[in-house]
């Protein structure tokens, strides 16, 4: 299926997606100007990309530190696969700020990208998830926005 979707995406679609990934708030008029199309043509292309499943959702990217979530942690978890549903239930029933939850390759089979109010809230979360498996944690020192750098 992926190959059939790729055949339906042209260079203009790629340009539109690249612009939207950098600034999803851009107006259809401005987006049209950048790719030399009308705003209605852009709208039609976005609807088609939605139907193809290329664009899955529109979302807000909250600046977590400004919002008050100061501790950004990447937690890798060697989760007992029989406990995955229990962990998901725990995460969803609590007010933790999980940005992404991935199944990954390697010894640590899952990765949680998350924000916490402070180190104390992070420690509370870690105490709860240790019952689901062993974990490794890395604290994010700085987010380096890629849109600040122009490609060469």
Image: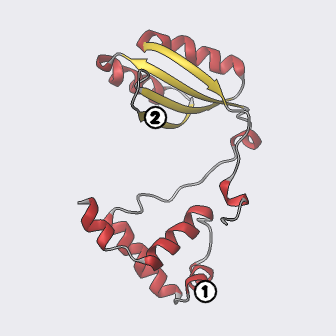
Q: Please, is residue 89 above or below residue 15 in the view?
A: above
Q: Residue at x 39, y 74 (%)?
A: 47
Mark 1 crowd level (few <14, some 14–19, many ≥20, 10 Å Cα): few
Q: Secondary structure at mark 2?
A: strand
Q: Please, is residue 149 above or below residue 74 in the view?
A: below
Q: Residue under circle 2?
A: 101
Q: Residue at x 48, y 81 (%)?
A: 42
x then y, percent, for residue 102: 43, 35
Mark 2 crowd level (few <14, some 14–19, many ≥20, 10 Å Cα): some
x then y, percent, for residue 24: 58, 65
Q: Residue at x 31, y 20 (%)?
A: 81
Label 2 vs 1, first from the N-terminus? 1
Q: State which quadrant residue 114 falls in.
A: top right
Q: Secondary structure at mark 1?
A: helix
Badge number at residue 60: none
- Which quadrant is the N terminus positioned in? bottom left
Q: Residue at x 38, y 70 (%)?
A: 49
Q: Nearer the viewer, residue 67 or 17?
A: 17
How many discs appear? 2
Q: Nearer the viewer, residue 8 or 56?
A: 8
Distance from label 2 to label 1 (Cα)? 37 Å
- Which quadrant is the C terminus positioned in? bottom right
Is residue 24 toward the left or the right of residue 140 in the image? left
In the displayed image of the protein, which residue is found farthest to the front?
Answer: 152
Q: Please, is residue 131 above or below residue 72 in the view?
A: above
Is residue 53 toward the left or the right of residue 77 in the image? left
Color encoding of the figure: secondary structure
Is residue 11 toward the left or the right of residue 142 in the image? left
Q: Residue under circle 1?
A: 33
């Amino acid at each position: 299926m992926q190959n059939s979707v790729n055949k339906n995406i042209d260079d203009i679609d790629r340009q539109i997606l690249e612009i939207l990934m950098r600034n999803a708030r851009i107006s259809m008029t401005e987006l049209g100007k950048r790719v030399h199309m009308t705003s209605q043509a852009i709208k039609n292309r976005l609807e088609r990309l939605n139907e193809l499943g290329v664009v899955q959702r529109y979302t807000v990217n909250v600046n977590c530190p400004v919002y008050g979530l100061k501790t950004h942690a990447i937690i890798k978890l060697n989760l007992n696969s029989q406990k995955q549903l229990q962990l998901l239930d725990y995460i969803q029933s609590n007010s933790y700020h999980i940005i992404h939850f991935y199944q990954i390759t390697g010894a640590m089979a899952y990765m949680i990208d998350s924000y916490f109010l402070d180190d104390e809230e992070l420690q509370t979360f870690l105490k709860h998830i240790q019952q689901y498996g062993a974990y490794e944690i890395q604290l994010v020192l700085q987010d380096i926005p890629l849109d600040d750098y122009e490609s060469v």
